[in-house]
Amino acid sequence: MKIYKFKCVKCGNCCRNKNLIVTITHYDLLKIYYTLKLNSIDDLLDIVAFYEIDINDKELLKRLIYPEFIINNKYCILGLNKNNDGSCIYLKDNKCTIYKIRPKICRIFPFNFIEKSNNLQPQINPLAVDICEGLNKGTVVNFSLFKEIYIKINDEMKEYKKLISLWNNLVINKVIEPSPKVFLNFISGNINIKVEN
C-alpha cells in the first residue's frame, strides 16, 4: 500500500473551492436536520442544493460515488449548499460550524478509496491535489479510521442507491412529483406511498 503523509492545516481550501461539492446521503441529511433542530423540510431547502449533472458525461459519472436522481426533468446529485463565493454554507471564519456532524465525505477528504482485487486502496482525491495544503505534511496517515468511515459510506450508499432507484422509478412512472421538496420528504421518510395491485 502506498504511504501518504497528511496533516490538516485548517487552510479551508476544501470548504471554499467552488468546484468541490459536498455530496450527502439521506443519513447525512437527517443527522444535520435533527442535530441542528431544523423545523421543517423548508429549512432543509435552504441548506442543500440540487446540482445538475450531464448524464452523458461518462468521465463525470465514473467519478461520482453518489447516484443521480431526477428533479424537475433534470438529473441531479444532492449536496450542501454554497455561499455566493462558492464556499460551503457552514464555513464561518475559516471553520466548519457543523464539524462534529460534518458529512462523512468531508471526514475522509483529501482521500478516497478505490476497490482493487476486493480490497479498499486509499488514494488522494484528484481534486485535492491542487488545493489541499496539508498533503505531504505531518505524519504518515493511518488509514484504519478512514477505512472504517469509507465502509460506513459504502453501507449507506447501498441503501441510498435503493432509495434513489425507487425515487427515479416513481418519477418516471409519474407516481410522484419530481420537486426538491417532495424529494427531501421522500428521502427523509416523510412520505407514505401505497402501491396498489
Image (cartoon, rainbow, N blue to C red):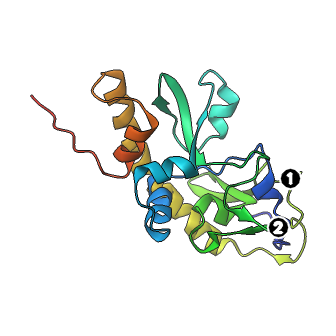
The image position of residue 58, as x and y in percent, is 65, 26
Q: SS at mark 1?
A: loop
The image position of residue 127, as x and y in percent, is 79, 48
In front here: 8 or 16? 16
The correct choice, above or below, for 88 with respect to 107 in the image is: above
Q: Residues within 10 Å of mark 1 (few under 14, many from 20)?
A: few
Direction from residue 191 to residue 143 in the image, left or right: right
- What amino acid is found at the position of numbered circle 2 in the picture? Tyr
Quarter of the picture containing the N terminus is bottom right
Q: Residues within 10 Å of mark 2 (few under 14, many from 20)?
A: some
The correct choice, above or below, for 177 with respect to 23 in the image is: above
Direction from residue 82 to residue 19 in the image, left or right: right
At x 80% / y 50%, what residue is drawn? 17
The residue carrying mark 1 is 129
The correct choice, above or below, for 19 with respect to 39 in the image is: above
The residue carrying mark 2 is 4
The image position of residue 82, as x and y in percent, is 68, 48
User: Which label sits in the foreground, 1 or 2?
Assistant: 1
